[in-house]
Image: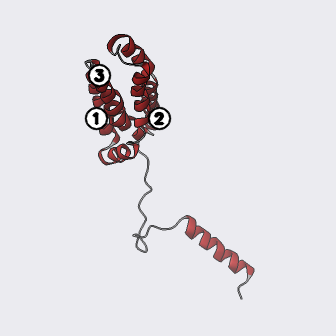
Amino acid sequence: MQSEAELRNEFALSRNTRSNPSPPNVQAGEQPPAEHTNTQSPYTKYTVIVAASATLFVGVGYTNAFGVFQEHYQANILKDEKPDKIIVIGSTAASLYLIPGAFTGRFADLVGYRVSLLIGAALMVVSMFTASVSTTYIHFLTMHAHCLHKFNESTVRWPSL
């Protein structure tokens, strides 16, 4: 039977070993490698937070601003269409960006967020320019709902979360 002092020593030894284990590739008598130090600027994390917030702000704002587009389309371009039919463009667009989130997140993991952001932003601009020359309902539905929000905005917004 061990004495109380021996048990305390053994417990203290096992606690130190668990909280501060030696690296498995260090041989007896060698010094373990120095701890990894963070070489990034302290402002890097704040820059990432500001950039992600700005990306989300623009994405959510663009999705919720379809009322402006709807008013313009109803008054100028799609005069013959019912307002109920025009609102389907915005409703579809607002809901479709959720679907490809799993795929665009994985895409951003594979190629990097910067590449994903640039591709998504460029495609959003192309989709907006294409929507500006559209003349029929199906063109607007395709450009706003499917092209713009489904893939392009998902590529920009979801990886930033």
Identify the amino acid type marked 1: Ile
Mark 1 in CB contact with mark 2 (< 8 angstroms): no
On residue 119, the disc is 1
Alpha carbon of mark 2 to alpha carbon of mark 3: how far? 32 Å
Q: Quadrant of residue 128?
A: top left
Q: Position of residue 6 (x, y in %)?
A: 69, 80
Sooner in the amino-acid sequence: mark 1 or mark 2 = 2
Crowding near the residue tagged with mark 1, few <14, some 14–19, many ≥20 C-alpha atoms within 10 Å: some
Identify the amino acid type marked 3: Ala
Q: Position of residue 63 (x, y in %)?
A: 43, 27
**Disc 2 on helix, strand or loop?**
helix
Sooner in the amino-acid sequence: mark 1 or mark 3 = 1
On residue 131, the disc is 3
Of residues 11 and 160, the one drawn nearer to the viewer in this rendering: 160
Q: In the rendered view, tell whether residue 142 sits above or below residue 116.
A: above
Crowding near the residue tagged with mark 3, few <14, some 14–19, many ≥20 C-alpha atoms within 10 Å: some
Residue at left offset 43%, top offset 46%: 38
Identify the amino acid type marked 2: Ile
